[in-house]
């Protein structure tokens, strides 16, 4: 193991390690990489623990990333036997993928020629239950048409198969035993595959669709959400801090400017300092279509209220309800949720965003200022789209900014006119897992 | 150990010296500190309040027998308070005097060294030897100030328009602390060696109590460490008790003449551990003194 360390450690391997970290969402700058290499000259390179600490101290600047880093380090700088094991597992998995692809290509063919489907679609097909595969095959067989219509018919068939795969994907997506890991074929490196595989459960919950998270995981989710809410809050206030003129006499400039008048101070100069934080206004959709996200939504309000004093929250479905007081007492999450659902009249009803925003504008005008940042959590599905769009536009003009956390997967956005409409008046982000929220907090607000 | 011996320090020696000055640290803390010294880079220390961030700077100054210059950050802190300011009163008096003697008034005689008020950053840059510069609770300032600090820490020189550029003779040992109230900029983080201090393990906390409150008997030491650890991990407090709170508790219990932890003691001293009214309510609602005792005795 020692020789392994000595021979490979520095140049090649280190760069590759940094590359892997980047894929795991940890961005390390060149300056930091160089510093890390320099740091390694000051520790005993044979002391694994010190090496690990030195790299962490110079490259990992966010405690939340430490767990991932540790896992990556342990896997990457593993003894050769273990590395061999990783390689083997990888090769097997690759072989399995190829086998599945071939199977799909043979099955999904029209007149001996494979349909033009994406790799992901093919893999999805191969992993379907035999019963469903058979149905698709039979459908293909039944669609055999005379040769002259061949070229025109193939694309239609392809899109039908694609649609049917998508249907299955959605259906399976809603059952509990469906595993999202099954479909991640983007991981192109044995070490990375092994790292992701071994990352603790705590991290995998990040990638779980929020509506599928079970009750037993709620405490963990609450903690994560609290952390994320806090970061979101500080990011927002950093980004939108506005300058309120706090006037302070600038004596230096005053004295300088007045030297020429023989020291009599004629003209006073002032300087300004910025302080004020923005107000946050949260509007969450709790209509029927969002009901599976209800606990996520409430957790989100709960988490944000814990860290931001100046927050006002509303829920809406057919109408708008003011809910700030429910969160002000800091009761336990369960108590809050039960009380809220008990008192609310709109829970699980239809959606009318336009009506809700109209009420907001009419009844709470003082909350809408040029210092207010509005966060909307919703899947955009609403009645009276035109009205909603108009109201959103009006809201937009009154406030600093609107951020929209959309629980619909981004790939579906183009199929929903509502998304296209509302996107014009807000900054919209895909957000149905904690990882999305994390990414929004980490990336989107940096610039 | 003197700063001139910096090149000879080792991880072992540094840990030993830290302990000599009452700071208990394992490699997870010592290695980053050691590297910051070796690389001559600022160390950025993050962690909950009271886990021993500020203390590191103080101990460094003791270990290297050098001065500690402290810049305490707060909302609204600006360059004038951090770097330098002109002594306006003195300038105004001078102006008055010159007028009376009717000699000539120029900018040069008003903006010279004798009218300069040195604030911590300038003091650190002008120090005749290598000092420890503690920039405490940087998250309390705003981004504008952070950007300014970033500049200063990049090249340790400042230019004062009236006087020219002043460059540090020795790069100070810089310690920045951060309570995590807001995220710091990537630029600043990149420049620093990073250290996150977590709450201590039970063993480490016991050692700290022994060093800081040596009068307390072993049984009580053990039970205090267990109790605080239990509270931190089992209840969701707004503000978890930290090492400072543990030490306050240990001192108080010693004064009360306690030899072991009892429910009665906890009732009397809980407000030393928990500072927030809601946290105290939560404690009595979810656990209570008896519950706490029962749980630590179970172990
Ligand atoms: N490892 C340690 N060994 C000995 N004493 C410690 C240790 N860590 C912390 N302490 C003691 O705990 C107390 C709090 O430490 P310190 O003031 O450095 O905390 P801090 O992290 O700077 O807190 P704050 O964020 O509130 O400023 C001090 O009395 C310090 O001596
Ligand atoms: Mg401190």
Image: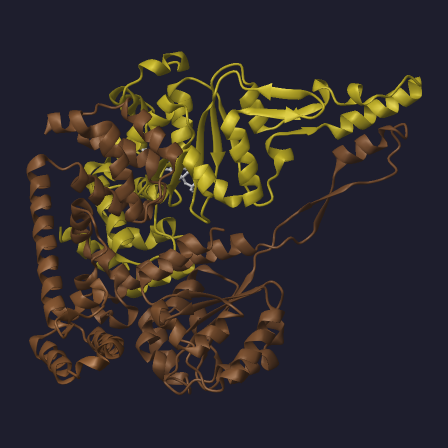
Q: Is residue A43 left or right of residue A413?
A: left
The residue closer to the viewer here, B146 or A167, is A167
- The residue lying at 40 percent from left, 84 percent from top is A343
- The residue lying at 78 percent from left, 19 percent from top is B108
- The residue lying at 15 percent from left, 70 percent from top is A113
From this view, report whether residue A93 is shown above or below residue A407. above
Q: Which chain is yellow?
A: B
Q: Quadrant of residue B216?
A: top left
Find residue A246 and report its horizontal and vertical position in percent.
69, 50
Find residue A355 and report its horizontal and vertical position in percent.
52, 85
Q: Is residue B158 left or right of residue A172?
A: right
Q: Quadrant of residue A49?
A: top left
What colour do you see for chain A? brown
Q: Is residue B267 left or right of residue A182?
A: right
State the quadrant of the N terminus of chain A: top left
Q: Is residue B243 visible?
A: yes
Find residue A236 and report its horizontal and vertical position in percent.
50, 57
The residue closer to the viewer here, B206 or B199, is B199
- Name the residue at the top extreme: B4
Q: Is residue A329 visible?
A: no
From this view, report whether residue A98 is shown above or below residue B111. below
Find residue A421 and report its horizontal and vertical position in percent.
49, 75
Q: How is the image coloured?
A: by chain
The residue closer to the viewer here, B91 or A176, is A176
From this view, report whether residue A197 is shown above or below residue A310. above
- Name the residue at the front extreme: A148
Total marks shown come to 0
Q: Is residue A375 left or right of residue A221?
A: right
- The residue lying at 19 percent from left, 70 percent from top is A115
């Amino acid at each position: 193991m020692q020789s392994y360390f000595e021979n490979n450690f520095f140049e090649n391997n280190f760069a590759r390690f940094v590359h892997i970290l980047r894929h795991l969402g940890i961005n390390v700058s060149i300056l930091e990489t160089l510093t890390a290499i320099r740091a390694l000259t000051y520790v005993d390179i044979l002391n694994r623990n010190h090496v690990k600490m030195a790299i962490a101290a110079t490259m990992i600047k966010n405690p939340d990333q430490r767990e991932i880093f540790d896992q990556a380090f342990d896997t990457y700088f593993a003894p050769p036997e273990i590395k061999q094991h990783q390689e083997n597992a990888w090769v097997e998995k690759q072989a399995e993928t190829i086998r599945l692809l071939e199977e799909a290509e043979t099955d999904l063919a029209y007149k001996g020629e494979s349909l033009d489907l994406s790799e992901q679609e093919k893999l999805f097909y191969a992993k379907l239950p035999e019963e469903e595969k058979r149905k698709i095959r039979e459908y293909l067989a039944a669609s055999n048409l005379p040769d002259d219509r061949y070229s025109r018919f193939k694309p239609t068939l392809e899109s039908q198969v694609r649609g049917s795969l998508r249907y299955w994907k959605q259906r399976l997506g809603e059952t509990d035993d469906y595993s999202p890991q099954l479909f991640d074929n983007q991981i192109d490196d044995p070490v990375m595959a092994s790292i992701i595989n071994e990352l603790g459960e705590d991290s995998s919950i990040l990638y779980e669709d929020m509506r599928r998270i079970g009750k037993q995981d709620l405490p963990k989710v609450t903690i994560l959400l609290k952390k994320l809410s806090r970061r979101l809050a500080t990011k927002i206030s950093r980004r939108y801090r506005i300058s309120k003129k706090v006037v302070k006499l600038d004596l230096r400039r005053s004295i300088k400017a007045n030297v020429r008048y023989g020291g009599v101070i004629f003209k006073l100069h002032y300087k300004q300092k910025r302080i004020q934080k923005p107000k946050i206004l949260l509007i969450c959709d709790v209509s029927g279509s969002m009901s599976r996200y209800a606990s996520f939504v409430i957790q989100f309000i709960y988490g944000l209220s814990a860290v931001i004093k100046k927050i006002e929250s509303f829920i809406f479905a057919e109408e708008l309800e003011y809910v700030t007081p429910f969160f002000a007492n800091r009761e336990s999450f369960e108590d809050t949720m039960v009380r809220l659902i008990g008192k609310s009249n709109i829970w699980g009803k239809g959606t009318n965003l336009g009506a809700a925003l109209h009420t907001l504008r009419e009844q709470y005008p003082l909350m809408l200022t040029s210092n207010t940042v509005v966060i909307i959590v919703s899947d955009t599905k609403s009645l009276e789209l035109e009205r909603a769009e108009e109201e959103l536009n009006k809201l937009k003009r009154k406030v600093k900014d609107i951020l929209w956390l959309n629980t619909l997967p981004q790939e579906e956005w183009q199929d929903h006119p509502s998304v296209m409409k509302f996107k014009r008046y807000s900054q919209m982000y895909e957000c149905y897992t904690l990882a999305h929220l994390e990414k929004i907090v980490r990336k989107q607000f940096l610039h | 150990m003197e700063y001139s011996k910096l090149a000879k320090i080792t991880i072992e020696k540094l840990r030993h010296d830290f302990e000599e000055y009452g700071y208990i640290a394992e490699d997870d803390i010592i290695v980053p500190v050691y590297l910051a010294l070796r690389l001559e880079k600022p160390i950025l220390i993050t962690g909950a309040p009271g886990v021993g961030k500020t203390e590191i700077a103080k101990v460094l100054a003791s270990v290297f027998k050098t001065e500690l210059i402290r810049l305490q950050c707060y909302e609204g802190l600006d360059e004038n308070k951090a770097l330098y300011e002109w002594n306006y009163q003195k300038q105004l008096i001078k102006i008055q005097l010159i007028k009376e003697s009717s000699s000539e008034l120029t900018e040069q005689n008003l903006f010279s060294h004798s009218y300069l008020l040195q604030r911590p950053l300038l003091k650190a840059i002008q120090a005749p030897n290598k000092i420890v510069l503690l920039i405490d609770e940087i998250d309390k300032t705003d981004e504008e100030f952070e950007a300014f600090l970033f500049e200063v820490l990049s090249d340790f020189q400042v230019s004062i328009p009236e006087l020219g550029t002043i460059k540090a003779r020795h790069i100070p040992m810089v310690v920045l602390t951060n309570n995590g109230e807001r995220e710091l900029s990537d630029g600043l983080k990149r420049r620093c060696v990073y250290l996150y201090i977590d709450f201590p393990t039970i063993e480490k906390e016991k050692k700290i109590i022994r060093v800081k409150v040596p009068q307390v008997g072993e049984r009580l030491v053990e039970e205090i460490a267990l109790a605080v650890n239990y509270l931190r991990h089992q209840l969701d407090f707004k503000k978890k008790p930290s090492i400072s709170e543990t030490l306050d508790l240990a001192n108080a219990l010693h004064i009360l003449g306690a030899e072991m932890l009892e429910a009665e003691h906890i009732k009397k001293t809980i407000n030393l551990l928990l500072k927030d009214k809601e946290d105290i309510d939560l404690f009595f609602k979810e656990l209570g003194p008896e519950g706490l005792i029962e749980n630590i005795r179970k172990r």
